[in-house]
Image (cartoon, rainbow, N blue to C red):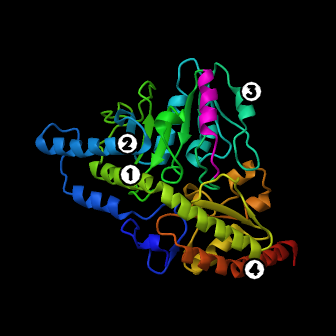
Amino acid sequence: MDERAKTENAPERAPGRIHLDHAASSPIVPRALEAMVRQSGLVGNPAALHTSGRAARAVLEDAREQLAEAIGAHASEVIFTSGGSEADTIALNAGTRRPGRRTVLIGATEHPAVATARTRMAGVEVLSCDRDGIVHLKDLDERLDASTSMVSVMTVNNETGAIQPVSEAAERAHRVGAWFHTDAVQALGHVPLDFATSGADLMSLSAHKVGGPVGIGALVARRDVELSPWGLGGGQERDVRSGTQSAVLASAFAAAATMAVENLETEHARLSGMRNRFVERVRSTITGCYVNAPAEASPAIVNLTFDGTRADDVLMLLDHAGIDCSTGSACRAGVHQPSDVLLAMGRTLEQASASIRFSFGPTTTADELATLAGLLPDVVSRARAAASVAVDVTQDPS
């Protein structure tokens, strides 16, 4: 077994299963769980003035400072949210409401929390990308003007792992006075992340992608960025987000993020090696297999197209074999359709419908990927046979 999985930093894995869907949700790490248990006795509301309230407030603010330190931000820039999707929504909502500016430009391969803004918010337009999913900076240059309110381009793509030219896009946005937002949910703990030097005005993060608890994330916003209030209430989080804050969840989030950043260099090298060996083996044993990512990509994600298959068939066969993976963003779970990300990258409808995402984290071992690589040739063969039968049935009117 991989020695990394034996360390105290490795979370528990589901009995009898191989979890290769960390981009959807990664198991909670011991340090985060310990923080939750340690703070579970808190009874005060962080907004209350009595002793119990002040104790909860102290835990909350300690967590804010710890998270800020991990990502190169100032504590006052951290706004706790319920997760990455809410952080994205708050950012986009503010971008569409800037006085005198009416246009928000978003990448073509964004997470649904950003991508759906094009049909639900006025003034949102989509930037083109190349076949690797990298935003066309020339297109951005041609569309930026004084009416541009915000540009939103994610740091690491959640389906392919593609790393975007965030600093360059931010610099261009700032030339016309536009804000720059980046969804960095899949970047934290996998690629270097420093808010102060990133060029971003707004950055979205989520706890459960790095071994923290589900239900908390953060929008990191520069202090000179005036955000619109999100919802009604007391405005507890910088007069932007209302509602009683969870000091317990914030503490666990900060613990998980700190650990992820501390381990980034060694974990990046470990995952890169395993990912490369896995991809090489799969491509050498399965014909019609393609990687959907540029050379520079997160080591934690690999998206593979298996020609002649239906992704759902591959996923279900692997699920039956005890392996967790996905057909794309978890925010589309249960409503599988061809990946919008891959379609934007120029893949055909058939290719986008035949693609599987495997994503890795602290529990992932070389033995697990070897097991997957050994299973895939038979799984793909069976999936292709099933797809062929389905085509024959639809074409035969009898």
Q: Which residue is mark 4?
A: 381
173 inside magenta stretch: yes
4 inside magenta stretch: no
Q: Amino acid at mark 2?
A: Glu
Q: Position of residue 179 (x, y in %)?
A: 55, 28
Which element type, helix, strand or loop, lies under badge 1? Answer: helix
Q: Residue at x 62, y 59 (%)?
A: 328
Q: Position of residue 197 (x, y in %)?
A: 50, 34
Which element type, helix, strand or loop, lies under badge 4? Answer: helix
Q: Residue at x 23, y 58 (%)?
A: 38
Q: Which residue is mark 2?
A: 69
The residue lying toward the viewer, choosing from 61 and 308, is: 61
What separation in Å lies between label 1 and label 4 (alpha carbons)? 43 Å
Q: Earlier in the sequence, mark 1 or mark 4?
A: 1
What separation in Å lies between label 3 and label 1 (alpha carbons)? 39 Å
Of the two numbered discs 3 and 1 in the rendering, the one whose residue sits closer to the viewer: 1
Q: Earlier in the sequence, mark 3 or mark 1?
A: 3
Name the image quarter holding residue 55. top left
Q: Which residue is mark 1?
A: 258
Q: Which residue is mark 3?
A: 142
Q: Earlier in the sequence, mark 1 or mark 2?
A: 2
Is 265 left, or right, of 59 in this rendering? Answer: right
What separation in Å lies between label 1 and label 2 (alpha carbons)? 8 Å
| Magenta residue span | 162-176
